[in-house]
């Protein structure tokens, strides 16, 4: 894969990754957050939201920082996310990724955020405001 460096920004605030039983009702979530992701499968209900919106009954992990890749990316383009997260994997930075219609979001644990930023910039990716 031969990619140009990607541009990304860090979303403000801290995020939680939460798990609820599959039969749980959707908790109320304010649409004002920078990122809310709700995924229901046959096994679970997963929610990514700001720390202050984490459902009380959920099993949660966090805090996480979130990087938003500057998209949109056409569906025919392959390896975009891999080009961003491979340097993190090589440097031992765990991630949680979310893809949307237009772009990708990569969450890193708050304790790893500074290392992640250094790693991404060393790989040629550009942090933008």
Image (tube, helix red, strand yellow):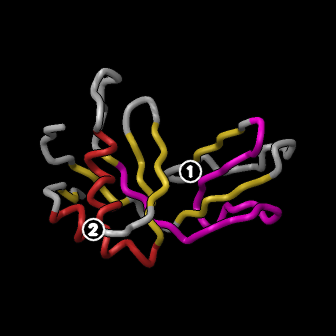
Query: Residue at the spot x=18%, y=37% of the render?
Result: 1
Q: Residue at x 17, y 56 (%)?
A: 126
Mark 2 secondary-structure assignment: helix
Name the residue beneath numbered marker 1: 32
Looking at the image, which residue sits at the far right? 23
Q: Is residue 115 left or right of residue 46?
A: left
Measured as percent of width and height from the top left, residue 10 is found at 35, 60
User: Is-magenta flag for residue 52?
Assistant: yes
Query: Which residue occupies the extreme front position in the image?
Result: 90
- Disc 1 to disc 2, C-alpha distance: 26 Å
Which of discs 1 and 2 lies nearer the camera? The answer is 2
Quadrant holding the C terminus: bottom left
Tell me if label 1 and label 2 are in contact, CB under 8 Å.
no
Left/right placement of residue 42 relative to residue 37 reads right
Using residue 32 as the reference point, say whether residue 13 is left or right of it: left
Where is residue 94 drawn, in percent x and y? 44, 64
Which residue extends farthest top? 76
Q: Which residue is mark 2?
A: 117
Q: Specify the segment rendered in magenta.
A: 42-68
């Amino acid at each position: 894969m031969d990619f140009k460096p990607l541009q990304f920004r860090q979303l403000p605030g801290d995020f939680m990754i939460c798990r609820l039983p599959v039969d749980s009702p959707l908790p109320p979530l304010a649409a004002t957050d920078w990122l809310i992701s709700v995924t229901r499968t046959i096994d679970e209900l997963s929610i990514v939201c700001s720390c202050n919106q984490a459902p009380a009954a959920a099993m949660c992990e966090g805090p996480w920082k979130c990087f938003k890749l500057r998209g949109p990316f056409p569906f025919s383009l392959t390896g975009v996310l891999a080009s961003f997260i491979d340097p993190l994997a090589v440097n031992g930075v765990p991630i949680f990724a979310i893809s949307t219609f237009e772009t990708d979001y990569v969450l890193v644990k708050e304790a790893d955020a500074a290392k992640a930023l250094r790693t991404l910039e060393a790989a040629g990716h550009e942090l933008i405001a």
